[in-house]
Amino acid sequence: MNTETPKTDKPLDFIRQIIAEDIATKKHEEITTRFPPEPNGFLHIGHAKSICLNFGVAAENNGTCHLRFDDTNPDKESTEYVEAIKRDVHWLGYDWGEHLYYASDYFTQLYNFAVKLIEMGKAYVCHLSGEEMRTYRGNLTEPGKKSPYRDRSIAENLQLFEQMRNGEFDEGTCVLRAKIDMASPNFLMRDPVLYRIMKTSHHRTGDKWCIYPMYDFTHCLSDMLENITHSLCTLEFENNRPLYDWVLDTLQTPCHPQQIEFARLNINYTVTSKRKLLELVEDSLVSGWDDPRMLTLSGLRRRGYTPASIRAFCEGIGVGKRESWIDMGILENAIRDDLNTNAPRVLGVLDPLKVVITNYPEDSTETLEALNHPQNNQMGKRMLPFSRELFIERSDFMENAPKKFFRLSEGREVRLRYAYLITCAKVIKDENGEVVELHCTYDPESRGGNAPDGRKVKGTIHWVSAAHSLQAEVRLYDRLFTEEFPDADKEIPFKNFLNPDSLQVLTDCRLEPNLANASASDRFQFERQGYFCIDSEDSSAQHLVFNRIVTLRDSWAKLAGKK
């Protein structure tokens, strides 16, 4: 499937303006973009913005978007990450078709390009240590110093580079550097490293190579080899663009893609650094990369977010040139907007309190009609069993309730959703004084919730039939961090701000029986409770587990307003 970004009348962002101008001037025969993740972790919400942009602009212009893995660091990469990334991109709604590539596909060509730079006198083998190299590089006010190995002959550099490839040197003893300008104001242009020695088995090439190209050397040449027209990347690569262009210009390649930088997605109350996400996983502070509290795409999928909601979120925040922060509530509103339209309504009691309707016939059951969606008749209706014993939400009852409490209290009447009007007649407590059961009476003439004499009842509450209800575990997820910017203070570990209430597990929830056949792809609104879905990993027919995707309203915004 290839999900095209819908045409709108919105003004074009600056990237789409550039592409539109290139099309108008016939600069390119076909627009070709790429999404180039490094397979060293799972994709997160920040990657979704890049995926939607790269695949989106290609689709809008009848072009092609490649999926290419930047697999040049075998120490941190694995096939597991490769497969997870492919799964996430597909789930988000995009298909690369036949255009699946790996930087490792080009290792031989990249090596030959490096040899060509040496032959041109534009690269040399350097034996400075990492610390020495940093010292030689200079600082913001002083230019760098030339490496003592910089003026080796071309023949000597060619021989040394071949020895590097043959494994004749230990890791860290030497590197291949570009010969550019040690006085450049851009530190990346002060003879950057192009190749380093890594005697590590690669997940695709095995032990064929013991030297691996650096990102800046690999990326531009991979783009060139694939005839990419627009290399879209985030702002942290802006300083890398001169090196991107230098490599291609120096080698006089037949194709020179245009690198364009855009602002990355920064979202509050979370971290998106792969290193920090991995730390959370390895320290067992979350259940895994797909923990529903993580803003990884696999975590969002398990939590119940839809691909459409994430695409809508990315479209809504737009593409800009300046770094900014997006409020978590905007992401949450995107899934609310989607599910408010598309999720059927059901009844679920999370904290059950037993109700006995004393004037309802014993051993009797009837079925009541309920709407699957109050604003969409096409979603149809369903039948709910109703019996003498019910469960209601414990919070829908209060002793000594104030006047503005329009739910159940002794002597008060409320409406049961789709059912009858009931009045609380007696409160049953245990030996500790805790309310354990309510005895109520119902008005048999009020079927459907309407009083036959026209009396007005303000309160409406949800319920389930006790005998027919499904017992389920429900997991209430909240934001993973209590601080808006958990990694802003470098002196305080970001893990100090983990939210201790980010997961609440309720083990004895009661749901309407129509949910017995729910699948992991289904989402529901539990009326008055929020949006929920089956947990794709832990739920079974014998033990139902539901995740709360999002609340009905943004409770965090209310809390922020009170501060």
Image (cartoon, helix red, strand yellow):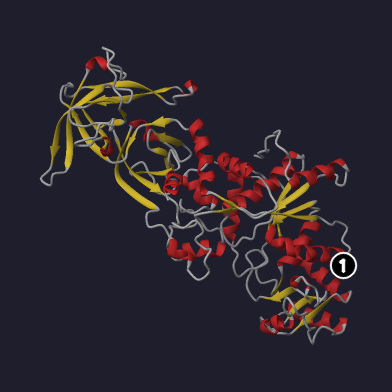
Outermost bottom residue = 148
Measuring from the top left, give residue 190's x and y in whole percent.
Answer: 78, 75
- Which of the 4 quarters of the picture holds residue 451? top left
Determine which residue is flagged by label 1. Answer: 250
Q: Residue at left 67%, top 40%?
A: 2
Q: In x, y percent, where is residue 378?
A: 49, 21
Residue 449 visible: yes
Q: Furthest-left residue in view?
A: 431
Instruction: Name the one closer to the observer, 450 or 376.
Output: 450
Q: Secondary structure at mark 1?
A: helix
Residue at (61, 57) in percent of width and height: 82
Task: Name above or below for residue 59 compared with residue 110.
Answer: above
Picture quarter containing residue 143?
A: bottom right
The part of the image, by quadrant, that contains residue 94 is: top right
Amino acid type, residue under disc 1 in the picture: Thr
Question: Eyeballing the image, is 395 above or below 178?
Answer: above
Q: Is residue 96 visible?
A: no
Residue 294 versus residue 333 in the image, above or below: below
In the displayed structure, 288 sits above or below 30; it is below
Instruction: Say whether residue 31 is left or right of residue 203.
Output: right
Which is nearer the eye, 60 or 136? 136
In the picture, measured across the screen, residue 100 lies left or right of residue 154, that is: left
Q: Position of residue 342 (x, y in %)?
A: 50, 31
> Does 238 sit left or right of 87 as displayed?
right
- Left/right placement of residue 434 relative to residue 34 reads left
